[in-house]
Amino acid sequence: MADSQGNTEDLTLRRRKRNRNLLALTGAAALLAVTATFAISAFNSHRKKSKKKDLQGSSVRANLSATDILKLAGRIIAKSQEVHDAIASIPLDKVTYANVVVPLADLEAHQFPLIQSCVFPKFVSTVEDVRKASSEADRRIDAHISTCRKREDIYLAVKAVALKGELMNTDAKQYIKCLVTDFERSGLNLTVTKRDEAQRLRVQIDELSLRYVQNLNDDKTYLMFSETELAGLPSEYVKSLDKAENGKYKVRMKSHHVLPLLEFCKVGTTRRTVVMAYGKRCGEVNLSVLERLVELRHKYARLFGFSSYADYAVDLRMAKTSSKVFEFLEDISATLTDLATWELNVLKGMKKKEEGELPFGIEDLLYYVKRAEADQFDLDFQALRQYFPVDLVLSGIFKIVQDLFGLRFQEIADAEVWHNDVCIFSVYDLSSGELLGYFYLDLYKREGKHCHTCVVALQNGALSSNGVRQIPVPLLIAQLQKGINGQPCLLRFAEVVSLFHEFGHVVQHICNRASFAKFSGLRVDPDFVEIPALLLENWCYESFSLKLISGFHQDITKPIKDDICKSLKRWRYFFAALKLKQEILYCLFDQIVYSADNVDIVELFKHLHLKVMLGLPMLEGANPASCFPRSAIGYEAACYSRIWSEVFAADIFTSKFRDDLLNHNVGMRFREKVLAPGGAKEPIEILSDFLGREPSIQAFIDCRAEYGLQC
């Protein structure tokens, strides 16, 4: 390991001599760079110039005023209207690929970065008026796009081109197919009566979905507990609670109150009371909302010829059919049963030792897993933060991404940004020097900023009709806490993993070489989109890469120790089977209610709970379906998708990367075969081509069994 790391450092230093802006520094190399030019220093103090550089090839407008945003939105809508009207004026017997499809493709490629320039300020701007204008622009543009998708004249023109059978390449055929599908999913292949019915149902569904979520947001349920009843909870947690005149503490039924309590409270009756109350939130009201939502969604799907809403939702995804999803979830659940049973027996033994003969319940799961973690691992995550200064973590990520995928990153010091914390990087192909794209990095918390870490596409790559390739431009938004009084920003390990995940999306966006903006960036199959990001997370748990990204903040030549690296890898899959069983329970529930009529939702959850959770009953009176928003809005009939992506990411990592973490040849094949095609090819074809076989669930199961039984 030492020799390997030394070679890596030498290589890094040689490359730095060629280009001091190259962001690829290892722990030891970074120390040598402190007295020279530590490239990532710009993350903490962005340089100001009087004249801002334009980004060649980027149409993104980074710092628009509120007035400019609304004016640009108006121009976008007017231009779109002009192009659509021009296409609609062409007689159907005169339509061609060149006069119908090309203008639509060019319009999308040209307008996407302009639309995003209007929309993304609502996530990041420091000015309230700008955020409001951005939200209003988003509403206007979204309404216009929705109208365009319902234009029958454009649909008929595109369909006429499709039926003419002109000679064209595979990407163009796929693009036309997707255009037709988009129109038809908007109801344009239905009779007028059915189309009106679909619109009416859509309005009702949207209203009910929002009501379900609003009911949860408005829920004010809380419980009062004495200090004795909260035994075991950290003092900081107890101090954060409101205290009543009688001396008791108010625990609100919100996740930030409930989850820590379930992990640390020693009092079993307190945990049980909280789980029951948490599971009863919005019980009757949201149960009736969900039942009505399921009914309306089935009706909506059947207007389009599907037997259930689940089949409608999964049809355009990698899984293709609801039956395939059932098979997938059942296979994973069954193969995990032995390991999950062993895990549950361990936890039952721990409860018996601590609480006597009281039966083990679902309310005990998080608490005893946490206790088992404390027994098994000497991991102080608060102390571990001192080994993850943000500059060092980022330089390690750049190093890994560079060596694996043949990318070179160079900071642009004086381009237009919306805040001094924001940095911009050019991304080049390491071999040819070709400019592949740019990406913005907005790392730190501030008032008014979007509260989740994510990647936003600002410009999608595309090949225009004149043969010029538009380059991709993503934005990575994070929510890190700045260091105080000159101290570095130190990352929690969860934040390290999150940054790796989002950089997976950045690489995915930059390396995409699709011909059409519609297939570029993150606009790929939703069952596929998380795979590259989940793949890159694996480097957070390997000793080689952990040492690469870590260093004690007061002496960055000292990375985390070998035993900590090994513990983190084992901890990753600690009691993973039981945790995954619980997730599968909710995914199966979601899939079943959207696959059949007249399902008794309460009884279904009780039945699944006993079956999937190895005989553990659902607490009497609780109704998880009333407080499971993913099944109501956003992920309805698609809750399985996260596990689906994890399975295929595990297969790719285990079979191709685990034994050689910086294998450039494998990384380049991944870039060319998996990332480059984007949404233009079927994901299963892409993965099978890269793996040399069809993807399998076995690696996903094996790694959990291997490390689970070690514990």
Image (cartoon, rainbow, N blue to C red):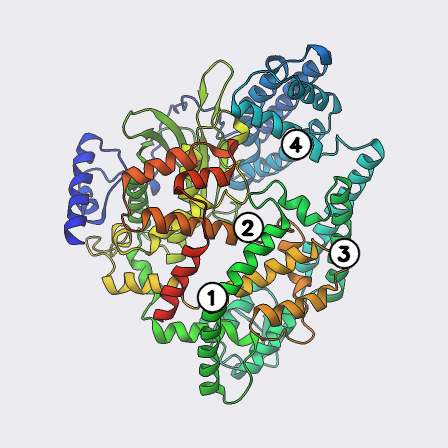
* SS state under label 3: loop
Q: Look at the picture and state if 308 lies above or below 668.
A: below
Residue on which disc 4 sits = 181
Q: Residue at x 29, y 25 (%)?
A: 433
Marks 2 & 4, CB-CB < 8 Å contact: no
Disc ID at residue 597 = 3
For discs 2 and 3, the disc positioned in front in the rendered view: 3
Q: Position of residue 347 (x, y in %)?
A: 46, 78
| Residues packed near mark 2 inside 10 Å, few (<14), some (14 to 19) or many (20 plus) | many
The CA span between labels 2 and 1 is 18 Å
Q: Look at the picture and state if 144 lies above or below 283.
A: above
The kind of residue on which mark 2 rests is Ser
The kind of residue on which mark 4 rests is Thr
The kind of residue on which mark 1 rests is Ala
State which quarter of the image contains the N terminus: bottom left
The CA span between labels 1 and 4 is 39 Å
Work out which residue is located at the far front of the displayed protein and give it.
Answer: 693
The CA span between labels 2 and 3 is 23 Å
The CA span between labels 3 and 4 is 26 Å
* SS state under label 2: helix
Work out which residue is located at the far right of the displayed protein and give it.
Answer: 193
Residue on which disc 1 sits = 577
Q: Position of residue 368 (x, y in %)?
A: 46, 76
Residue on which disc 2 sits = 641
